[in-house]
Amino acid sequence: MYGRTEDGPGLDALDARLLLLLSDEPRLGVLECSRRLGVARGTVQARLDRMIRRGALAGFPPELDLAALGYGLTAFAVLEIAQGRRGSVADRLAAVGEVCEVHATTGQGDLFVRVVARSNDDLQRVIDEIVGISGVLRTSTSIALSTPVRPRVRPLLERLADTD
């Protein structure tokens, strides 16, 4: 039952089990995935191609530990920006290497930005760079002390995989 839901491309239980398998072992080949899932190789390839085409599967990047790479400080900045400047500000934020993600939001601020830094002094440098972007009016920054729940999609996939 591969269809479109109100929220976008729909996934069925086999798609979810395939994504869980690749989440656990991203280096598995199509043939090994088909063997473990008990379906034809062509079925796995067609499912992967369809998920990529519909945007449900964007790639297979490795999961990196930014602290191990020297970026042990994570912070979140809420930016207030000038009217009509969201696109240009987002483009400039994308050019800042320490900016990991940017979300347009409702509420107090206009953009919610996750940044990483090597130290408090380095964070000050990054924030100064962000505040210097034309169109940024104000920023409020919070430093993350820990990450009790890491970014994840596994529970959603597991729920879907159990629908058989």
Image: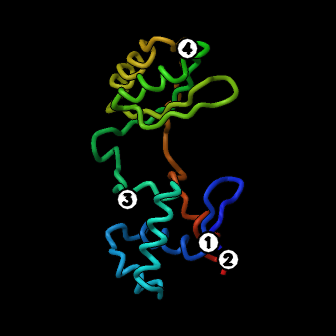
Return the x and y of residue 161 as percentages of the image width and height: 60, 74
Q: CA distance from mark 1 to mark 3?
A: 20 Å
Nearer to us: label 1 or label 3 = 1
Check disc 3 and report the residue beneath it.
60
**Residue under numbered circle 4:** 138
Residue at the disc numbered 1:
12
Per the image, label 1 sits on a secondary structure element best described as loop
Q: Nearer the viewer, residue 86 or 127?
A: 86
* C-alpha span from label 4 to label 1: 44 Å
Q: Which amino acid type corresponds to the residue marked 4 in the rendered image?
A: Arg
Q: Nearer the viewer, mark 4 or mark 1?
A: 1
In this rendered view, identify the residue nearer to me: 71 or 93: 93
Q: Is residue 17 above or below residue 76?
A: below
The answer to which image quadrant residue 22 occupies is bottom left
User: Are discs 4 and 3 less than 8 Å apart at CB?
Assistant: no
User: Looking at the image, is mark 1 or mark 3 earlier in the sequence?
Assistant: 1
Which kind of residue does numbered mark 2 sit on? Thr
In the image, is residue 133 above or below residue 22?
A: above
Secondary structure, mark 4, is strand
Name the mark on residue 3.
Answer: none
